[in-house]
Every structure is written in structure tokens, then in C-alpha cells.
Image: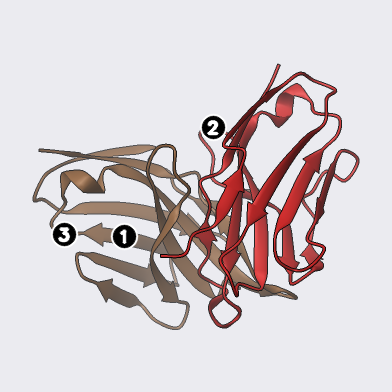
Amino acid sequence: DQQVKQNSPSLSVQEGRISILNCDYTNSMFDYFLWYKKYPAEGPTFLISISSIKDKNEDGRFTVFLNKSAKHLSLHIVPSQPGDSAVYFCAAAAVNTGGFKTIFGAGTRLFVKA
Amino acid sequence: EAEVAQSPRYKITEKSQAVAFWCDPISGHATLYWYRQILGQGPELLVQFQDESVVDDSQLPKDRFSAERLKGVDSTLKIQPAELGDSAMYLCASSFLGRQETQYFGPGTRLLVL
């Protein structure tokens, strides 16, 4: 039972254009949604998050949009740069007894072509 | 910048052998997580600690896996005996008590069971 789904295994974008990565979830009880970026041979690094009570959060070139009615979120990267080429994981976090339990999607590999 | 440390980075073992992984979280981070990431999938939580206490080990195969964080700082994950299906990346992450939705990952230990 995949609670967090990233249906596109890969995405290719030209440098300078917008990259849009999508994510769907099934559990309406999640409190936070996050995006992590992962380069080869490294662990995932936190990129941006959004609380379930908001619909948009922006940080520089990165914006996350949340559509609760559709149980869908997206990450926009504008403008895309070659250094953005990585695997992007969507994640959803819900409160548990020890803090938060986080569920990750399978990831989308982004290729930004120069 | 403080980082999560993990060792070893790579481990090759034969099935039925015992293996152990070590993690040192960022200083001051009370919550520690062990994840398993199979190729092509997102990280899956194995066990979550709050200080020295286990708060979630529902996905830990307890017949062969064990984890401890005796002094509430560094942690060890053990597999005994290892099976072929255990080949994966084992990631450790930690989070600050006031921002538990955001996790900081180590570089991981890549395990290959032959």
C-alpha cells in the first residue's frame, strides 16, 4: 500500500526552463509534506517543506504547492540548473509517539540539460 | 556544518553472516532513524528512537534485525543472519526535537549480501 506516490520515474528539462515534479498521497492525516534531493553516493538532503494547513511555500528557486482536495503536491524549480540534476523524493510526515513518522515516495530522477 | 556520520560506507558479506552498521547523529538531535532503501525505491523506516527509547519499530524484521541506542547518542543496527534480500542502502537520519519533520541523513551504508 503506497501512501506516497511519484508516478514519473524520470524527467528531462532544458536549463533555464521550469521543472515540475509531482506527488500524490492517500492519507489525509499527514501534517507535513517535504521534498528531499539526493545525489549519487550521498544521503538525501532536505530541500523544502509545507505544512498541511498551507497551499504554497517558496524558497528561492523552489516552490511547493499543496492541493489537499486532490491529495497532490508539486515541486517547481525555476529556473532549472544543471546542478539540480538529482533524484527528488517526495515525503509525507504524520505525528507519532516519538515525533513524526515519514513516508517516502519512490523518487523522480531529474535531468537538467545544459 | 554538522553531519550525520555512518560507517562503514560499504559492506560485502555472505549470507548467514552477521553485519553491523554504526551511526552518529548530529549533536543535540534527540530523534534517530534507521531506513532501508532498496534500489529504485524510497527510504523505508525500520526503526525510530527518541533518545534511547524505541518509539517505532513496526517495520523492523525482529527475527534477524536489532537496533540499539544505549546512551541516546550513537546507534547500531545489526542483522543476523544476513539474507540475500537484505542487500540495500541503509540510511541513518536524525532530527532536532523542535523540528522533527525535517530529517538530516547520513551518507548511508551500502550492503551487498552474496
Residues packed near mark 1 inside 10 Å, few (<14), some (14 to 19) or many (20 plus) = many
- Of discs 1 and 2, which sits in the foreground? 2
Q: Which chain is brown?
A: A
**Location of residue A85 by image quarter:** top left
Measure how far apart labels 3 and 2 are at the Cα level. 29 Å
Q: Is residue A29 left or right of residue B48?
A: left
Name the residue: 50% across, 34% down.
B40
Whether label 3 touches label 2, CB < 8 Å: no
Q: How far apart are marks 1 and 2 (CA)?
A: 23 Å
Residue A39, above or below A57: above
Residue A42, x across and y down, in percent: 44, 44
| Distance from the alpha carbon under mark 1 to that under mark 3 | 10 Å
Residue type indicated by callout 2: Leu
In this figure, which residue is indicated by the disc labeled 2?
B39
Q: In this view, does A87 lie to the left or right of B32?
A: left
Quadrant of the image for the C terminus of chain A? Answer: top left
Q: Position of residue A6 (x, y in %)?
A: 44, 47
Looking at the image, which is closer to me, B106 or B65?
B106
Where residue B35 appears, as percent x and y from the top left, is 64, 49
Instruction: Tell me the SS state at disc 2.
Output: loop
Chain identity for the colour red used in the image: B
Where does residue B74 sit, x and y in percent of width and height?
Answer: 70, 59
Q: In the displayed structure, does residue A71 sit left or right of residue A101?
A: left
Same chain for marks 1 and 3? yes
Q: Name the residue under label 3.
A: A78
Is residue B98 shown above or below B35?
Answer: below
Residue B53 occupies quadrant = bottom right
Q: Nearer the viewer, residue A4 or A14?
A: A14
Decide if residue B60 is in sight here: yes
Residue at 76% across, 18% down: B14
Numbered badge on residue A75: 1
Q: Which amino acid does label 3 sit on?
A: Val
